[in-house]
Image (cartoon, helix red, strand yellow):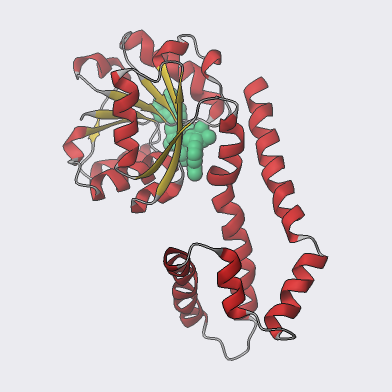
Amino acid sequence: MKICFLGCGNIAQAIIDGLIKSGMQPSNIACIERNEQRVRSLKSQNLQIIELENLASIDFDLIVLAVKPKDALSAAQSILKHAPTAIILSVVAGIGIEKYSQPKSIIRVMPNTACAFGKGVTAIYALDQSSVAFSSANSLFRKVGHVLTLQNEDEMHRFTSIIGSGQAFLFQVLNTYLKELEKISSTDQVAAKSMFQDFVSSLGDSFSQNPSFESLINKIKSPGGTTQAGLESLEKNNLDKILQDAFKAAENRSIEISNE
Ligand SMILES: NC(=O)c1ccc[n+]([C@@H]2O[C@H](COP(=O)([O-])OP(=O)(O)OC[C@H]3O[C@@H](n4cnc5c(N)ncnc54)[C@H](OP(=O)(O)O)[C@@H]3O)[C@@H](O)[C@H]2O)c1
């Protein structure tokens, strides 16, 4: 499979890292990028840098559109100007398929940065889900993690908030833990980060072994103990609502972007 990324910033880099880890050759990945610093970094990874004007000269299976929402519609139009039969895999948040000049040429995907470790979770949607391109897009993202096929494009807003943005909400919560740990006066900051790496990855290990949060919590909590006291405080302060409000805010912003 030969693919080209238009826009090679954070999310494109995460997908590229995951694809290369999965065994894809860098020579099968091309990038169109305008940011000089990014271009230098991409070249150092032996990725092919091409100009938009040369898009049609290489037979790409898929072209991944990975620019910010404000740049997306014009970039998609430029792709179709140079490669009119191209199938564009848009990772752009919030912009619905019908907003593009040729909706049938667009497959929407919403990956997250965990693609870099082969642990991505990607939602995918297209008007025609029986096409060869749709199944190629599915296979591409299965190389870097899990794929969830949506039947209704509106579900992309909620998925974006929980899985796309939601990763950052958990990072924010974990950062509070790290800051608290660093407040203990004998903590060496470098050691704290290293301890914390194991603390965070062990959460995933625990869930892999026992995928029930209720039972994992019950293994830590004892009646009248410290965990119980902390959990009661979280409940009193309505942690569920705080997070649900964050999901809703991100979902609403995704809907807003789609209407801008
Ligand atoms: N980051 C995530 O975790 C994530 C997850 C899921 C989806 N997304 C979506 O992915 C898209 C990209 O996000 P990102 O965080 O990767 O953004 P980013 O780091 O800013 O990367 C976009 C890159 O594309 C370049 N670019 C923009 N227009 C271009 C053009 N016409 N030709 C060539 N290069 C162009 C930008 O250059 P300049 O710096 O010069 O603008 C930038 O280097 C967004 O629409 C976002 O909604 C992101």
* Towards the viewer: 85 or 37: 85
Percent from the top left, x then y, of residue 124? 44, 31
Percent from the top left, x then y, of residue 217? 60, 72
Residue in the picture at 42% in, 68% down: 209
Task: Locate residue 6: give its quadrant.
Answer: top left
* Towards the viewer: 146 or 174: 146
**Is any part of residue 40 visible from this angle?**
no
| Residue lying farthest to the bottom in this orientation | 186
* Towards the viewer: 14 or 255: 255
Residue in the picture at 58% in, 49% down: 166
Quadrant for the N terminus, please. Answer: top left
Percent from the top left, x then y, of residue 41? 31, 45
Residue in the picture at 77% in, 72% down: 232
* Residue 240 vertical position relative to residue 128 in the rendered view, above or below: below
* Residue 117 vertical position relative to residue 151 in the rendered view, above or below: below
Percent from the top left, x then y, of residue 142? 32, 40
| Residue lying farthest to the right in this orientation | 236
